Amino acid sequence: MITIIKRRFLPDKIKVTSWDVIQPYFESLQNREIKSVKELEDWLKDRSELDAFLSEDLAWRYVKMTCDTAAKELEEAYLFFVNEIEPQTAPFSDSLNKKLINSEFLNQLNEEKYFVYLRSIKKEIEIFNEKNIHLMAEVATESQKYGSIVGSMTIEIDGKELTLQQASNYLKNPDRTVRENAFKTIQEKRFAHADELDNLFDKLIALRHQIAVNAGFKNYRDYKFAELGRFDYKPEDCFAFHEAIQKEVMPLVKEFNEKRVKELGHSLKPWDTEVDTQNRPALEPFTSGADLLEKTITCFKKVDEYFAWCIQTMDDMDRLDLESRKGKAPGGYNYPMAETSVPFIFMNAASSTRDVETMVHEGGHAVHSFLSKDLELAAFKNCPSEVAELASMSMELLSYEGQDEFYPNKEDFKRAKEEHLEGIIKILPWIAIIDKFQHWIYTNPTHTAAERKKYWIELSDEFGTGMVDWTGFEHFRTISWQKQLHLFEVPFYYIEYGIAQLGALAVWRNFMNNKEKTIEQYKAALSLGYSKTIGEIYQTAGIEFNFSTAYIHELMKFVKDELSKNN
């Protein structure tokens, strides 16, 4: 069991029931006289403790709400924090940032240790505007409605009420009629809520654009790049990434589709893209959430015993909710807990190979939390997504070493591995589409829903192979972007998956040559948290921070070779 952190600034028993409970601690930090560099570092530790406590309090409110979207009291507890606590903390945080930057002892801090942290603080000061405090609270309130809307969607197949996640397993059924029925039923349910989600998205776009304007930015895209602390690349680099995907990845996706058509013996409809081409039933690598957990722990132990210990510790501390059920929000996540450093994994498992990928992915995030738990400040653990997703996507590939726990039959494992590796290639165009879509959305904030659908279809054609026939179902295609939770809840958080995926492939390539050294480098990189730049963290992992056309070409060749070996 992991030791719970002892507090030095806050009382052991403190509960956020009102702003009055928290305010004195912010005022204490704001009014404290700092007479030396040591006192400045003590002040930083106390501020970190307060930030970590509040971060974990909000985390639990979000976790509980997403685990049961039908429980209004849980939603109200989350919204209380978002609407009553966060707006009060925002001006204090700005004031404390300025107190730090204006301290006469700032230049005496260890430059190497604090460089990344101070760089972020200066950027926070630059973009802060008091007018945005309540707008941000409104955005948080509105964006959580997406989970409630989608979480409430259920359909009936074979007399059973199923969540959309559970129903998606029917898209792998060898019977084409069953697949077609499942596809239509799922999409009709989504389409019934399409206008509701369009209206919600329109509202979010308007709010976000106003936040950007208030902060002195031309558009929300530019504001968000600053808020995310994208010091290492610009929008132009994203456009180059989109072009590289078009050039280096799309030909491989087309090859996969050509192979699929040949093996199925007919053209592709939207319900033919996931079924096994040899008419084998979908793999069922586990039977329940408990079985998924047990097999994951054993799988991780075969890669590295510490990885298994992390997941076991989470189970011991009730930090997992794995199975899909009615009323549960969609998707999956690993939520870091800033104070205890033991995160929470949430997912909607339905006994599919995709669920295994999700579990080991979120498990990688969890291991990251454990490895960075001893860093001195909470801010040192708050990694950018390019680093966080490197941890999780690398784990998807490293865990091949133990996935015979899920697939004891060698042929089943080969099949699962092929699906996963092909999936890595096929997800890259989707990442490019989602990212490019967002650039357009937020640099054209007054567009209509009809214009948005039109542009989405243009992108889908640009990053498509032209081999999937949507005739008769074009209306479903125009809203397919609505299934992407990130667009509603965490805008611009998506290209990081593509960047990190390239890094993960490079980690796996190293692992194939030297397993022990690669695990050592992986753990060393994750232990850095965000105390170094992204480039330095990638270098520590033994790889490059690189998403150029040449690098993508090199890695796609590697994956293609591995697929050939697998087959």
Image: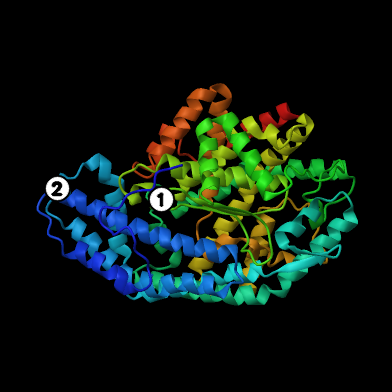
Please give the residue where the numbered disc 2 appears in the rendered image: 37
Please give the residue where the numbered disc 1 appears in the rendered image: 340
**Residue 249: where, in percent of width, then height?**
64, 42
Residue 400 seen anywhere in this rendered image of the structure: yes
Pick whichever, 400 or 256, lies toward us.
400
Residue 473 seen anywhere in this rendered image of the structure: no
- Dividing the picture into quadrants, the one containing residue 356 is top right
Report the residue that reaches farthest toward the left.
35
Report the residue that reaches farthest toward the front.
13
In screen coordinates, is 227 left or right of 237? left
- Residue drawn at x 90%, y 57% as measured from the top left: 177
- Residue drawn at x 60%, y 29% as measured from the top left: 302
Badge 2: few (under 14), some or many (20 or more) residues near its Cα, within 10 Å?
Answer: some
Question: Residue 514 has which mark?
Answer: none
In screen coordinates, is 415 left or right of 219? right
- Residue drawn at x 56%, y 38% as measured from the top left: 395
Question: Image quadrant for the C terminus?
Answer: top right
- The secondary element bearing badge 1 is classed as loop
Instruction: Say what amino acid the circle numbered 1 marks.
Output: Thr
Classify 353 as above or below 563. below
Pick whichever, 50 or 430, lies toward us.
50
- Dividing the picture into quadrants, the one containing residue 264 is top right
Instruction: Say what amino acid the circle numbered 2 marks.
Output: Val
**Residue 481: where, in percent of width, then height?**
64, 63
Q: Earlier in the sequence, mark 1 or mark 2?
A: 2
**Residue 556: where, in percent of width, then height?**
62, 36
Classify 398 as above or below 181. above
Picture mark count: 2
What whole-number distance in Å separates the C-alpha atoms at marks 1 and 2?
A: 27 Å
